[in-house]
Image (cartoon, rainbow, N blue to C red):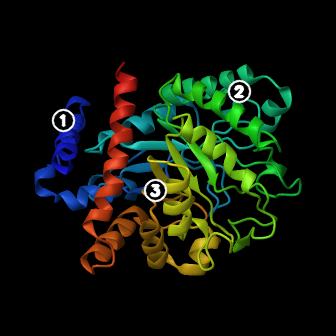
Amino acid sequence: MRKIIFILMFIFMIFSGCSLKNSASRTSELDIMIGQMVMVGFRGLELSADNPVVRDISDARVGGVILFSKDCALNSTVRNIANPVQLAKLTSDLQSYAEVPLFISIDQEGGIIKRLTGEMGFPETPSAAELGNSGDTQAAFRAGQTIGQTLKTAGINMNFAPVVDVNRNAANPVVAALQRSFSDDPRIVARFAESYIDGLHSEGIISCLKHFPGHGSSHGDSHLGFTDVTDSWDPSELYPFQKIVSDNKADMVMTAHIFNSRWDRKYPATLSRKVIQGLLRRKLGFKGVVVTDDMQMQAVSGEYGFEEGIYRAVKAGADILLFGNNLIYEPGLGAKAVSTLKQLVHDGKITERRIRQSYERIMHVKQEMRAKNKG
């Protein structure tokens, strides 16, 4: 199986027209596999050869990037996006440095949470709350389709949406307050999320369910620190994930940095094998790609640090480690994450077999993405 996947990767590279100027024959299979497990944010409206993300992609073989409209560390409105023409050029340039086509991702949920705005020249869509309140699932499909068309034109192939958190706490600062949930009814959440996903899929865009196993009942913000949902979380919050997974519409699932002692007495969901392997993969039957929420959020980075966070997330079963590189900016962060993963394998803390499992899941999604967009 591993030889077939690796051969397919090279066929994929050749037929997609990717540059082979840094020949993969000089790079070990393990290096390539590890690189695919890292997704990173960066600064710049355009690329120059000395931009650190170029080295992340061409030298460290980082498999994905995430785009932002604002630079949080600088408190600036200038980051990666200015207008449609600029963005299409940026994404094209990013792909030109990759041996394996990149996941180019964004958070374009609709409503308040969007990186592509009307002021920049992009179409806007309603929030999840507005869609759910409308009672019209076709409106959710149209929203997903509009976003899909916008992303496809811009050269973006992955959307970190929809949010399938159930709106269990009206005072929730990161879900309810931002109109990110379709409903307080898990069945309505699942139904509208599936229509939204169908809209994204109609344009060949990869979706990502978030935030597993459900962030809707929280009273805190995991961006800022430890967030405990032990007393507020309800099993009904699993329903949207379970339904969408069982209907084979889940491309990826993003984990939440929330803690629940009923799931795991020691680790938050992103770092918990009991949550990812036990709850998501075994109980819900999800076989696709698991991506972490931003590993720089304080609930992980502040509690566990960089290396320990990476180690625990991969041991737990995460396939892609997301580093927004925006809350705190660090040039070359993608390469640093790749190097840390390599060292963990070298030290025997993570097995090559474990790396290969994630790599094969990632490549399966990339191959399906290429096939859909080619068709």
| Residue at the farthest front position | 283
Q: Name the spot of residue 91 as percent of width and height, x first.
A: 43, 38
What residue is at 10 percent from the left and 52 percent from the top?
Answer: 25
Relative placement, left or right, of 191 versus 170 is left
Q: Decide if residue 71 is in sight here.
A: yes
Eye-nearest disc, 3 or 1? 1
Q: Earlier in the sequence, mark 3 or mark 2?
A: 3
Label 1 near label 3: C-beta < 8 Å? Answer: no
Q: Is the residue 339 above or below the residue 22 in the image?
A: below
Q: Name the spot of residue 201 as percent of width and height, x first.
A: 52, 27
What residue is at 71 percent from the left and 26 percent from the top?
Answer: 140
Q: Earlier in the sequence, mark 1 or mark 2?
A: 1
Which amino acid, by three-letter code, is at mark 3? Val
- Residue tagged 1: 11
Which amino acid, by three-letter code, is at mark 1? Ile
Q: Earlier in the sequence, mark 3 or mark 1?
A: 1
- Residue tagged 3: 40
- What element does badge 1 sit on? helix
Give the camera-side residue of 206 and 328.
206
Q: Is the residue 252 above or below the residue 353 in the image?
A: above
Which amino acid, by three-letter code, is at mark 2? Ala
| Residue at the farthest left position | 25
How many residues crowd around disc 2 within 10 Å: few (fewer than 14), some, or many (20 or more)?
Answer: many
- Residue tagged 2: 140
Eye-nearest disc, 3 or 2? 2
Relative placement, left or right, of 286 versus 29 is right
